[in-house]
Image (cartoon, rainbow, N blue to C red):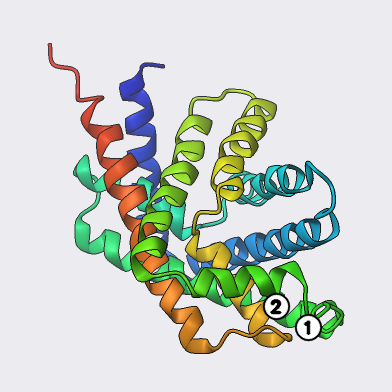
């Protein structure tokens, strides 16, 4: 396939997502809820690894490598993740297969579905006693506090970088013909944003909800402060740094 073919593939994916939301909104909602659930259980496991492996030299490396499992699950189960959809719908709108109003509506629907999915998993973890078992000095609580106490500017730019990398992982996976290649690409690329400590709004939903449900020090206003600016940054990273350049550098071939 030519590079142009991958643009068309991404545009068709954006169109299909919009049509699913329009024609079968409940099915689309379930897909977005599932993405939030998958990512939140991955987030919880990530923080457990960070806490339990903190004394190891490669502890953070191992935990960061694991996080790509969440995006892999989402890609392989056709779940709907807000951050990757910032790329897909930008490409489909740039190609004229969807419009920008439809794009905004889908982003909002997906974002809310992801949030609801995150809250479902947090409720399950709480019911299972997994959250109440966390020590007061757990890495998750420290991580959540660090995230919310950054300035708006820092969160915004970290959000741009996070989703630029996430969407790059998805964009590269489009080129992979074998499933094992997709898995390796996604895990290795996603590793970068976790290891560097960038801000992914949907992953943060799970982190903050767990902290709020447990013994964390953050408040609801703190959580929304981070989510506002990390979400805006994620939109810029996925749309302006990946989606639009992806379509622009691979124009329609003219004969």
Decide: is 237 above or below 213. Answer: above
| In-front residue for pair 197/234 | 197
| The N terminus, quarter of image | top left
Residue 125 location (% of width, % of height): 78, 77
- Quick check: 231 left or right of 241? right
Q: CA distance from mark 2 to mark 1?
A: 6 Å
Circle 2: element type: helix
Q: Residue 122 has which mark?
A: 2
- Quick check: 104 left or right of 159? left
Q: Which image quadrant for residue 178?
A: top right
Circle 1: element type: helix
Which residue corresponds to mark 1? 126
Query: In the current view of this chain or complex, which residue is farthest to the top?
Result: 255
At a point 61% along the width and 31% down the height, the residue shown is 182
Query: In the current view of this chain or complex, which residue is farthest to the left?
Result: 255
At a point 66% along the width and 31% down the height, the residue shown is 184
**Crowd class of label 2 (few under 14; some 14 to 19; many from 20; radius 10 Å):** many
At a point 66% along the width and 80% down the height, the residue shown is 211
| The C terminus, quarter of image | top left
**Crowd class of label 1 (few under 14; some 14 to 19; many from 20; radius 10 Å):** some
Residue 76 location (% of width, % of height): 63, 44
| In-front residue for pair 68/233 | 233
Contact between labelled residues 1 and 2, with CB atoms less than 8 Å apart: yes
Decide: is 176 above or below 89. Answer: above
Residue 223 location (% of width, % of height): 50, 79
């Amino acid at each position: 396939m030519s590079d142009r073919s991958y643009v068309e593939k991404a545009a068709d994916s954006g169109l299909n997502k919009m049509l699913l939301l329009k024609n079968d909104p409940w099915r689309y909602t379930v897909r977005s809820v599932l993405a939030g659930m998958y990512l939140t259980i991955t987030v919880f496991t990530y923080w457990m690894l960070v806490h339990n492996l903190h004394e190891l030299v490669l502890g953070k490396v191992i935990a960061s490598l694991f996080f790509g499992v969440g995006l892999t699950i989402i890609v392989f189960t056709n779940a709907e993740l807000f951050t990757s959809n910032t790329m897909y719908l930008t490409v489909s709108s740039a190609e004229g297969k969807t419009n920008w109003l439809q794009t905004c509506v889908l982003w909002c629907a997906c974002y809310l579905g992801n949030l609801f999915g995150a809250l479902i998993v947090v409720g399950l973890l709480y019911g299972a006693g997994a959250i109440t078992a966390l020590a007061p000095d757990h890495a998750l609580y420290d991580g959540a506090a660090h995230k919310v106490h950054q300035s708006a500017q820092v969160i915004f730019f970290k959000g741009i970088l996070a989703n630029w990398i996430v969407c790059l992982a998805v964009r590269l996976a489009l080129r992979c013909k074998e499933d094992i290649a997709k898995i390796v690409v996604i895990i290795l690329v996603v590793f970068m944003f976790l290891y560097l400590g960038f801000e992914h709004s949907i992953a943060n939903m799970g982190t903050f909800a767990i902290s709020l449900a447990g013994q964390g020090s953050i408040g609801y206003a703190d959580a929304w402060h981070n989510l506002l600016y990390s979400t805006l940054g994620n939109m810029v990273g996925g749309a302006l740094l990946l989606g639009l350049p992806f379509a622009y550098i691979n124009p329609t071939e003219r004969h």
